[in-house]
């Protein structure tokens, strides 16, 4: 590869990395919210699938991408309500309920997809990149940063907004306290369960949005298991990011880079590595992340524990 | 003297009767939860079918009843029950130790790979040696694959939930690489490995049915794991670690060692299940040799309340539902993935009923 080609490759790689990071950014920032409140939701994978399916179905019916995104968020939150009811109200084990919701998400979306859509074989119009005058036409930078669709750009806003809510509002302060010291919140007269419900709703709503991006902003079709582990990878991203929304944004970008690298190297004829090695890259990197980044000290101290009101 | 004895006996017998009554009523209550959970899940499935324009009652008439047609169809149910009982019983051990091994699917695949390797690369052994060798290879490979997650947990505190799931994807990709590359049977159009030599096949129980002795092995191992958990000191230590690792450490138990043992046992069982799928059913390695037995095993263990003995029953039940969902797809075009929905609802119902039972017990 000469220098010119290398830069073209690099620009395309960075553009693809952000796009592929987008579902992870939404899901992991959502997970930061629920985990900060002490709720570990391993059902994110199923939640993202529900978001992907609802988004696809709504856009298929109406032809509108905003409505599709709304349906994705709504579907995710509905799923989150089930999770919250089981884990917060009746205090069932969060991991068991999460595992059940993953099965349910996989099963329900595949069942409905096969019943209604698989035979149509039709896709939907996906969100198109917006052309920003001047910026999109810049050499290198244009391709790398300024030829994305609006959903991709909104990830920056999401990360900033999440940080403001979490660290600069009374709601965020209480939410974090619920994960660290729920008893203090309880004694102060606030309802721990309400805050945990809210945190789970924000988390699953964002996971649903991340899933909906897959069908509305990336691929134009729903495929069974389209999330392929992104819900689980988001959980690892949160650990790496030490439960910070801005951290989750950048760690997701790193994972997006692995995804992009895998896709683009597969297309390069000169690469002799079997494509499966590249395919396994995001998963291997997730494990390595967990091994080398020990942010356990930063974990909310009541993560995964139901709160018993006295 | 005589009178004292008489009095003592009067005192003893009602007590024994009461104990018997209590044991029986407890057994009835603990059986009621899973039965109710299954009924709720089937009703949910029926409602889902009805809402989407299928015949709702098919869930019972076709899915449950339809899978029992003749000896052959019962044999097919037991064939599906084999991996479910193996994985479910193994996961009971891990879950009792509070190790969330979600990676049985990957451990199954690695077991299948190892079994294929031993079954295709060696020739000329007697069936008495080769068939058990294949099973052993599968179990060891599964244990080793699970052991990676176990080691990362005890050494680096890496969450086994995430690592086992990542290892699932890696094992699946590895299988796809092997059957399209190094292990591929080049004479076949479809990516698959060479056929295992005859001596490596798991012996069948009846020669004209696919059912193999794996089901017997599964039942024996489930019973063995039950005895191990309930009666051995190691099993006791695993359960203590699961309930309270701090107390276990305080009592002088090696928490890390127990965690490793628990996750490796569950991995070995899943690996053995993979070996049986290759050596007993397909006789070749394929890209998608498991329809999700590893994930279904989680539901099997939870429905059994993490009791390996009960996993025999819940494994059989899920096998029946899976067979039934195949019949339902053929007769009424209902997508077979319905079975995943039913599994999810079963788990949710089990936890809900267990909580409600606890609430009522608290009221009494």
Image (cartoon, rainbow, N blue to C red):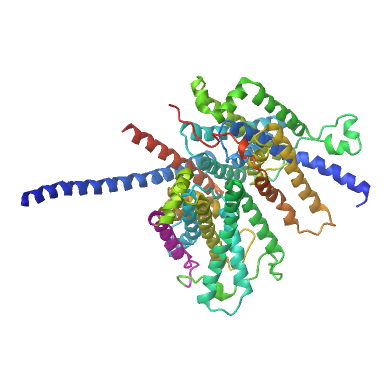
Residue A181 placed where, x, y %?
Answer: 53, 28
Tell me the chief SS of the magenta region.
Answer: helix
Residue A133 shown left or right of residue A202 in the figure? right
Q: Is residue B283 above or below residue B93?
A: below
Residue A202 seen by the camera? yes
Residue B353, quarter of picture: top left
Give the percent coordinates (x, y) of residue B216: 44, 65
Give yes or no for residue B224 being in the magenta stretch: yes
**Side (left or right) of A203 relative to B221:** right
Question: Which residue occupies 65% across, 26% down?
Answer: A166
Question: Residue B37 location, x and y as percent?
Answer: 42, 43
Q: Pick the residue in front: A272 or B230.
A: B230
Image check: B17 left or right of B233?
left
Identify whether A263 is placed above or below A168. below
Residue in view at x 78 percent, y 34 percent: A149
Q: Indicate whether residue B172 is drawn in magenta.
A: no
Q: Which residues are magenta?
A: B207-231
Front in this rendered view, residue B4 or A155: B4
Where is A89 relative to A251, above or below? above
Q: Report whether residue B302 is seen.
A: no
Residue B220 drawn at (x, y percent): 42, 63
Name the residue located 6 percent from the left edge and 52 percent from the top edge. B2
* Quarter of the image where the C terminus of chain B is located: top left
Q: Is residue A99 left or right of residue B38?
A: right
């Amino acid at each position: 590869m000469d220098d010119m080609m290398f830069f073209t490759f690099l620009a395309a790689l960075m553009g693809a990395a952000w796009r592929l990071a987008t579902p992870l950014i939404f899901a992991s920032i959502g997970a930061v919210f629920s985990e900060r409140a002490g709720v570990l939701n391993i059902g994110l994978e199923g939640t993202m699938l529900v978001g992907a399916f609802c988004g696809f179905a709504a856009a298929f019916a109406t032809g509108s991408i905003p409505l599709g995104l709304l349906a994705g968020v709504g579907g995710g939150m509905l799923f989150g309500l089930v999770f919250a009811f089981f884990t917060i109200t009746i205090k069932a084990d969060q991991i068991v309920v999460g595992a059940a919701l993953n099965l349910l998400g996989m099963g329900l979306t595949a069942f409905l997809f096969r019943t209604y859509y698989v035979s149509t074989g039709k896709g939907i119009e996906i969100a198109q990149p917006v052309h920003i005058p001047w910026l999109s036409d810049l050499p290198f930078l244009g391709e790398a940063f300024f030829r994305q669709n609006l959903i991709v750009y909104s990830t920056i806003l999401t990360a900033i907004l999440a940080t403001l809510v979490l660290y600069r509002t009374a709601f965020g302060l209480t939410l974090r306290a619920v994960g660290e010291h729920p008893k203090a919140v309880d004694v102060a007269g606030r309802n721990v369960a309400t805050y945990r419900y809210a945190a789970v709703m924000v988390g699953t709503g964002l996971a649903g949005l991340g899933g909906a991006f897959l069908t509305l902003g990336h691929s134009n079709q729903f495929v069974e298991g389209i999330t392929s582990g992104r819900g689980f990878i988001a959980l690892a991203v949160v650990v790496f990011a030490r439960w910070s929304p801005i951290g989750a944004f950048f760690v997701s970008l790193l994972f997006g880079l692995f995804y992009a690298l895998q896709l683009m190297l597969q297309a390069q004829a000169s690469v002799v590595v079997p494509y499966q090695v590249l395919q396994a890259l995001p998963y291997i990197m997730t494990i390595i992340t967990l091994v080398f980044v020990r942010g356990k000290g930063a974990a909310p101290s009541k993560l995964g524990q139901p709160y018993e009101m006295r | 003297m005589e009178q004292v004895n008489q009095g003592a006996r009067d005192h003893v017998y009602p007590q024994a009767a009461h104990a018997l009554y209590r044991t029986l009523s407890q057994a009835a209550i603990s059986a009621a939860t899973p039965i109710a959970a299954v009924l709720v899940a089937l009703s949910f499935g029926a409602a889902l079918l009805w809402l989407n324009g299928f015949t709702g009652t098919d869930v019972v008439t076709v899915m449950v009843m339809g899978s029992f047609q003749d000896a052959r169809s019962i044999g097919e149910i037991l064939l599906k029950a084999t991996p479910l009982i193996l994985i479910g019983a193994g996961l009971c051990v891990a879950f009792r130790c509070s190790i969330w091994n979600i990676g049985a699917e990957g451990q199954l695949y690695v077991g299948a790979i190892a079994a294929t390797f031993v079954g295709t690369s060696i020739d000329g052994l007697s069936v008495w040696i080769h068939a058990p060798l294949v099973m052993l290879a599968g179990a060891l490979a599964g244990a080793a694959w699970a052991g990676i997650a176990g080691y990362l947990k005890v050494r680096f505190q890496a969450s086994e939930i995430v690592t086992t799931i990542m290892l699932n994807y890696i094992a699946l990709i590895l299988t796809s690489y092997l059957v399209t590359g190094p292990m591929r049977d080049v004479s076949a159009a479809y990516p698959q490995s060479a056929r295992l030599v005859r001596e490596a096949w798991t012996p069948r129980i009846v020669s004209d049915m696919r059912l193999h002795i794996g089901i017997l092995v599964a039942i024996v191992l489930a019973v063995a794991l039950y005895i191990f958990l309930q009666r051995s000191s190691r099993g006791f230590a695993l359960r203590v670690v699961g309930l309270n690792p701090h107390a276990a450490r305080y009592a002088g138990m090696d928490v890390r060692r127990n965690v490793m043992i628990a996750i490796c046992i569950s991995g070995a069982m899943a690996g053995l299940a993979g070996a049986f799928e290759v050596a007993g059913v397909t006789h070749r390695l394929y890209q998608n040799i498991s329809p999700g037995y590893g994930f279904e095993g989680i539901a099997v263990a939870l429905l059994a309340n993490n009791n390996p003995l009960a996993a025999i029953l819940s494994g059989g039940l899920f096998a029946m539902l899976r067979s039934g969902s195949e019949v339902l797809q053929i007769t009424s075009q209902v997508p077979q993935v319905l079975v995943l929905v039913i599994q999810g609802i079963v788990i949710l119902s089990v936890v809900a009923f267990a909580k409600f039972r606890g609430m009522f017990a608290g009221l009494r």
